[in-house]
Image (cartoon, grey):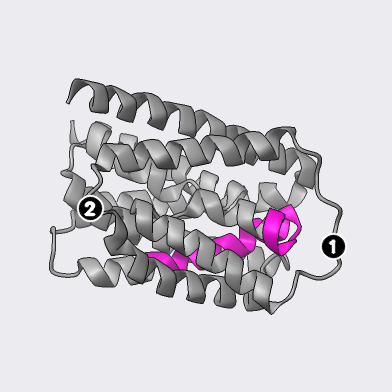
Amino acid sequence: MLLTMAALDAVLGLFIGLSLGLLGGGGAILTVPALVYLVGQTPQAAVTASLVIVGTNSAMGAYFHRLQGTVNWRVALLFGGVGMIVAYFAAGLSRSIPPQALMVMFASLMLVVGLYMLFSRSPQQRTEPRGLPVILAAGGLVGLVAGFLGVGGGFLIVPALVLLVGLPMQQAVGTSLVVIAMNSLAGFMGHIGGAELDLLVVGIFAAAGLVGTLIGARLAHRVEPSVLRRLFALFVVVLGILLLIDNLRQLLTA
């Protein structure tokens, strides 16, 4: 039984790392449900464990992408820094709204963004990202949504970097991982002293995830940007539909 659970943890961790390395997002939104529904952790413990797993894998993914020259550090630090500040102040805006309603809003936003990226024409390649005001505004917008909805915002970072800041898709993936690592560290600091970590589960998820992240980062470098963009968009749409169905069902039966 123990070996079976360890194998399941490794497979899940590998898939989550692959998502992060290839698409630059999907970590927390995959990790938390996996830890709750498949591993059997409480939601509180799953959130804390997810921050460690996703943060570790994102940091290593950013390192792998840096080796391939697909990280824009200036954009990452500016975008991520202002996003963290805005998210902190926006976190209290949604306290009177039911969690399921917030997730319905988030899922709807995922569908809008995913469908737009899926069916819109690829933006014209820019030689340089847009200026400082646009980077700060885009980071603040993602931080506002993430803080208000109580989510990490990984699925919003890549579209914002591509559509608003003007980064190429492959560079947006690598840059997104730096931002996710920053957000995960900040979130973990806020959860210290809360639910206890299952170090064995976290270790297996993180170790397998590092392998998946390495594979994903190498694939992202080889896949055509237009294909990568559509793959990301399709992934967002599918997860958005699943989240929407699950949370609407909970709202209607509450």
Within 10 angstroms of label 1, few (less than 14), some, or many (20 or more) residues?
A: few
Q: Which residues are magenta?
A: 162-184
Q: Which residue is rendered at x = 26% and y = 31% of the image? A: 4
Question: Can I make out residue 75 in this image?
Answer: yes
Q: Are marks 2 and 1 in contact (CB under 8 Å)?
A: no
Please state which amino acid type lies under the numbered disc 1.
Answer: Arg
Any part of residue 63 in sight: no
Q: Which residue is mark 2?
A: 200
Instruction: Report how far apart the C-alphas of labels 2 and 1 lie in the structure.
Output: 45 Å
Image coordinates for residue 64, horizontal then vertical, percent: 61, 63
Left or right, residue 133 beside residue 95: right
Relative to 117, is 48 on the left or the right? left
Residue for point 42% across, 42% down: 106
Q: Which mark, residue 126?
A: 1
Please tell me whether mark 2 sits on a helix, a strand or a loop: helix
Q: Secondary structure of the magenta portion, mostly? A: helix
Image label count = 2
Q: Is residue 38 above or below residue 61?
A: above
Q: Is 171 a magenta residue?
A: yes
Question: Which amino acid, by three-letter code, is at mark 2?
Answer: Leu
Q: Circle 1 — which element? A: loop
Q: Which quadrant of the structure image shows residue 203?
A: bottom left
Left or right relative to 251: residue 176: right
Q: Nearer the viewer, mark 2 or mark 1?
A: 1
